[in-house]
Amino acid sequence: MASLGATVVRLHETGGPEAMRVERLEIGEPGSGEVRLRQTAIGLNFIDTYHRSGLYPVGELPAILGSEAAGVVEAVGPAVDDFRVGDRVAYAMSLGAYASHRLIAAEKLVSLPESVSDHLAASIMLKGLTARYLVRRTKRLEGGQSVLVYAAAGGVGTLVCQWARALGAKVIGVVGSEAKAEIARGNGCHEVIVGTDRVAEGVLELTDGRGVDVVYDGVGKSTFDASLESLAKFGLLVTFGNASGPVEPLELLRLVPKCAYVTRPSLSPHVAERDDLLAATAELFTAVEDGTLRPPPPRLFDLEQAARAHRALEARETTGSSVLVPGLGDES
């Protein structure tokens, strides 16, 4: 059996960005139902930092981080009928993406249309599919509704704001600086709140005391109370991330005054079945092609600079998406 040397970023113990190690591993031939990919672009996501820190355990260590990428099929194993050598493909929610090459189950892959570049695909698979379930499944947004979106200049936030605006919702964004406020306004926000110290007060001022129908909160612990206070009667609080840590246990009686709803969704159940994955990605790619979504060009880091990329992400130095590129060098 032939093997191939791959550059990978592995975690041997949980911790800070320095816990990640750049290593060389041998990648063998694909087994039944698998393909071998030459990965051209690897998505960087906040969930990667949760895996690295141990907040979301990845199982037995050492482990290769990363959950999404795009690339080219280099070899096809037995019982693979949907893909051929040379096909451009992408995937999300499959741990082991921080690698120049990898083996992966073919059922996890989707074909890329010509209009979607590898860098774009790696920047929107996980974030775009997340935005899709938030605005199309968790709450099917309609015209006349109002939403509050945290991190409105970030990777997921930008896409949620664009999609919500296209569906006719009034969009209020929350960002950390005036510079990010301008980005948020350019990506669908009708109004922007800078900082998280007066979010609820700002929302009530902007909605004449009513509150919003939906809050999309990927920050978690530090913003949960303000998110709940920002809801209108019968509003829905969607807490889908833990950038500030996991939300404390909720006393359900707190929901009574507004008859509020709270949900904690995740992407995995929405794409666990192949048919659901194909339907979701088809809707995502259509939204890109018809201009509903206008993802900004991602910031590029060399794969071997993964630690630097994590630091930038956690320090809120990035806007939009970031992508790791094997062999990029120091061009980022």
Image: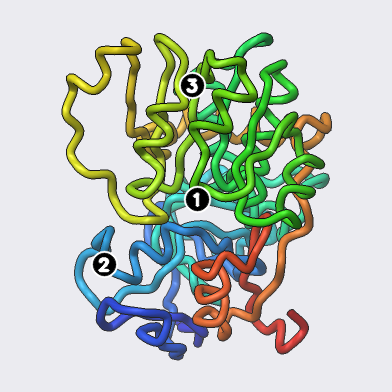
**Mark seen at residue 59:** none
Residue behind mark 2: 54
Residue found at x 35% / y 71%: 52
Residue found at x 56% / y 30%: 148
Q: Is residue 309 visible?
A: yes
**Mark seen at residue 92:** 1
**Quadrant including the N terminus:** bottom left
As measured in the structure, the alpha-carbon distance from the residue carrying label 2 to the one carrying label 1 is: 20 Å
* Image-based side of 138 in relation to 284, left or right: left
Q: What crowding class fits label 3: few (fewer than 14 Cα within 10 Å), some (14-19), or many (20 or more)?
A: few
- Secondary structure of the residue carrying numbered label 3: helix
Residue behind mark 3: 137
For residue 47, above or below residue 247: below
Indicate the amino acid at tag 1: Ala
- Secondary structure of the residue carrying numbered label 2: loop
Q: Position of residue 202 (x, y in %)?
A: 58, 33
- Secondary structure of the residue carrying numbered label 1: loop
Task: Identify the image quadrant of residue 70.
Answer: bottom right
Task: Identify the image quadrant of residue 40.
Answer: bottom right
For residue 244, above or below residue 248: below
Task: Identify the image quadrant of residue 66.
Answer: bottom left
The one of 282 and 159 positioned closer to us in this rendering? 159
Q: Position of residue 204 (x, y in %)?
A: 55, 23
* Comes first in the chain, label 2 or label 1: 2
The one of 99 and 46 positioned closer to us in this rendering? 46
**Quadrant including the C terminus:** bottom right
Indicate the amino acid at tag 3: Arg
